[in-house]
Image: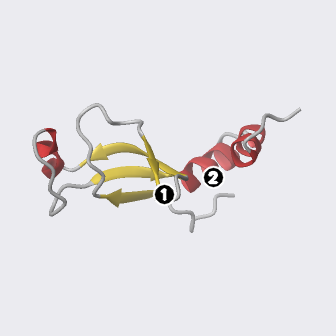
Amino acid sequence: RLNLKTPFNFVSTADITGGNSGSPVVNRAGEFVGIIFDGNLQSLPWDYAFSDKQGRAISVHSAAILEALDKIYGAKDVVRELLSGRAGR
């Protein structure tokens, strides 16, 4: 059963451009927190000049990735490996 309180997507002012989909998002501690998958229309000029006033990057949250792998796809070994940083034996 899916946990409906799991964060799914988030919005940031990450400086992206076309082709950045699939790029990792990391926090200040260097921890993986998501994957960029889109930007809003106002982020298109970031190819030339960055402004965080309206442009936004849209990312899927790492918790949603783990939730889907576990509950939808049943990939418990993959989730365990991602959380531990080691392949199961």
Which class describes the residues within 10 Å of circle 2: few (<14), some (14-19), or many (20+)?
Answer: many
- Viewer-closest of 33 and 58: 33
Residue 64 drawn at (x, y percent): 55, 53
- Viewer-closest of 16 and 61: 16
Residue 24 drawn at (x, y percent): 45, 42
> Looking at the rendered structure, which numbered label has been put on residue 54?
none
Identify the element where label 2 is drawn.
helix
* Marks 2/1: CA–CA distance: 9 Å
Task: Tell me the amino acid under the disc marked 1.
Answer: Phe
* Residue at x 10%, y 40% (from the top left corner): 48
* Residue at x 66%, y 39% (from the top left corner): 73
Q: Which residue is mark 1?
A: 8
Identify the element where label 1 is drawn.
loop
The answer to whether 33 appears left or right of 58 in the picture is: right
Task: Tell me the amino acid under the disc marked 2.
Answer: Glu
> Looking at the rendered structure, which numbered label has been put on residue 67?
2
Residue 2 drawn at (x, y percent): 64, 58
The answer to whether 63 appears left or right of 27 in the picture is: right
Residue 72 drawn at (x, y percent): 65, 45
* Residue at x 15%, y 38% (from the top left corner): 47
Quarter in which the N terminus is drawn: bottom right
User: Which of the two labelled residues, at mark 2 and mark 1, occupies the earlier sequence position?
Assistant: 1
- Viewer-closest of 47 and 30: 30
The answer to whether 30 appears left or right of 37 in the picture is: right
> Mark 2 near mark 1, Cβ–Cβ under 8 Å?
no
